[in-house]
Amino acid sequence: MKRLITSALALAACTFMATGAAVSADKPDEITVAYFLEWPTANQVAQLEETYDKEMGIKVNWRAFGNGNEMSQAMASGDVQIAYSQGLVPYVVAVSNGLPLKLIGVAVSYAEADNCVVSKDSGITKENAKMLEGKKIGTPIGNVTHYKLLRMLDHLGVDATKVQMVQMNGADAAVAFARGDIVMGCAFGGPMLRMKETGEYLMTAEEQEAIGIRVFDVISVTDEFATDHPDLVQKFMDVTDAANAAYYKDKVAAVPSIAKAAGMDKGATENMLGMFAFPSKTDQASDAWLGGTVQTFTKEVADFFVSQKQMDKALPSYDAVITDKFVK
């Protein structure tokens, strides 16, 4: 699993460094922003109505990805400039492997919208979780979902090295779960909810938070784009903040547009949004987020992945790859 996480990112880092010098600081005609389908967020009203394009004065392309590591690779290759709602873990993996990225904001805070669902037929619960040893679990490797899985297994006394973890994006895990190919599937958004229809959470969000699992997605940008076009990055953050505020002012009006952009029906969208919180720029600039807590938690996540032998090494500190500049 570690090779799967690190080799692609290392190759991408080399690609980024080899191509970076050819990029001009002139204002681009267009940029590409990475995002997830079946992951409804408040800013998708502005995405659908092309508010970003109007305010930034350029064409903003939105490209869907299956997981956060794919986002990192696309940013390294120069295909993507901004990743919206990238998982913290893929970001940690990327910068720990030398990708020149910067965490500039918190997209969404969530605990209930990302989880591991175990088959009811298996009879496995948190009380007898050691039964997972020797069984197949579908999970995206090297992202927040994977991190939560490892933390839960560690807490429940399950030897993760004895579990057959199979790399699966959420949609694939949901299909495999329905077929009975895996005893437990870990995913976020719509696929997680589909598995929950016939399964149970290994641990609830409340139980996870009680053992220190904090879950949020970030807004990341390439160092090059942030350095060459800080005005465009600031505009992107300003539009996002305004969209978040508009959502909280009238959630009912926002849901249809969000559902359309997320590729979900209205009911599922409302269900997912009820699990999300979108912190304002003011909140993000506070000590609870980019004022210090995110930096500390990022280091804890990195060190945990090293202890689990999922990464070779962590950075001494992640302060240099996280900035509150664009939320102040």
Image (cartoon, rainbow, N blue to C red):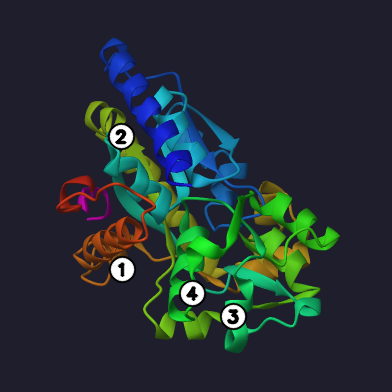
Q: Could you classify mark 2 by the number of other residues whose Cα lies within 10 Å: few (under 14), some (14-19), or many (20 or more)?
A: many
Quarter residue 176 falls in: bottom right
Q: Where's residue 123, x and y in %?
A: 74, 83
Residue 307 at x, y percent in the picture = 31, 61
**Mark-to-mark CA distance, 2 and 1:** 27 Å
Q: Nearer the viewer, mark 4 or mark 2?
A: 4
Label whose residue precedes the other's in the sequence (4 or 2): 2
Q: Position of residue 92 (x, y in %)?
A: 33, 50
Which residue corresponds to mark 1? 283
- Tell me the tag on residue 99: 2
Residue that label 4 marks: 152
Residue 28 is labelled as none
Asked if residue 45 shows in the view, the reply is yes
Residue that label 3 marks: 129
Nearest-to-viewer mark from 3 and 2? 3
Give the distance between the C-alpha atoms of the residues marked 3 and 4, in whole angstroms. Answer: 10 Å
Q: Amino acid at mark 3?
A: Ala
Of the two numbered discs 3 and 1 in the rendering, the one whose residue sits closer to the viewer: 3
Where is 224 relative to 34, above or below? above
Earlier residue among tags 3 and 2: 2
Disc 4, SS:
helix
Q: Could you tell me residue 253's position as x and y percent? A: 66, 63
CB under 8 Å between callouts 2 and 1? no
Write down the quadrant of residue 95 in the picture. Answer: top left
* Amino acid type, callout 1: Asp
Residue 246 visible, this angle: no
Tell me how far mark 4 sits from mark 2, CA to CA: 28 Å
**Which segment did they paint magenta?**
322-328
Question: Is 312 covered by the magenta stretch?
Answer: no
In the shown orientation, is residue 234 left or right of residue 59?
Answer: left
